[in-house]
Amino acid sequence: MTKQVATLQSKEQAWDRARPFLVDPNFRWVCMDTRVMRPCEMQTSHLFNSVKMIWNNKCPVAWRVQPYTEYKGVKRWGIRETKYAVKNLLRELANRSDLTPGMVDALGKMAARFPEFKLLKE
């Protein structure tokens, strides 16, 4: 292992200790423009809108958080990959201190439905 790689790994480990909600270090989000990003590289609004996009395209129509935009590709995702993405995106959002009141409200509405949402059950 090179000294540069070891330094980067130790910095990442220190960063993870400072962040109480751990995100899988192997998780990557593929953006609509095909960029591949770690959640920690995403802006808070991007994280929130990604969670909202998944939620709105997987949940019953009456539970959608507005505004709604249909993304046909999301509907084809399997349960396992959807849960994996939601878990890691939400964990990163939980580490953020710059959520707007609107984001907090929308996330609260989604969270209130989690127990009923079959997609999120084992």
Image (tube, grey):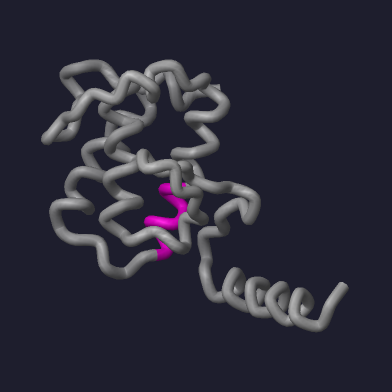
Q: Relative to the observer, which residue lies in front, 102 or 42?
A: 42
Q: Relative to the observer, which residue lies in front, 14 or 5?
A: 5
Q: Relative to the observer, which residue lies in front, 84 or 9?
A: 9
The span shown in magenta is 89-95
In the image, residue 17 above or below residue 64: below
The residue lying at 42 percent from left, 48 percent from top is 90
Q: Relative to the observer, which residue lies in front, 13 or 104?
A: 13
The residue lying at 31 percent from left, 59 percent from top is 44
In the image, residue 79 above or below residue 1: above
- Locate the N terminus by quadrant: bottom right
Residue 41 position within the rendered picture, expressed as x and y whole percent measured from the top left: 45, 62
Residue 47 position within the rendered picture, expressed as x and y whole percent measured from the top left: 35, 51
The question of residue 90 being in magenta is answered with yes
Quadrant of res 93: bottom left
- Give the overall secondary structure of the magenta segment: helix
The residue lying at 25 percent from left, 16 percent from top is 60
In the image, residue 34 above or below residue 61: below
Quadrant of res 34: top left
- Residue found farthest to the right: 1
The residue lying at 48 percent from left, 29 percent from top is 82
Residue 35 position within the rendered picture, expressed as x and y whole percent measured from the top left: 45, 48
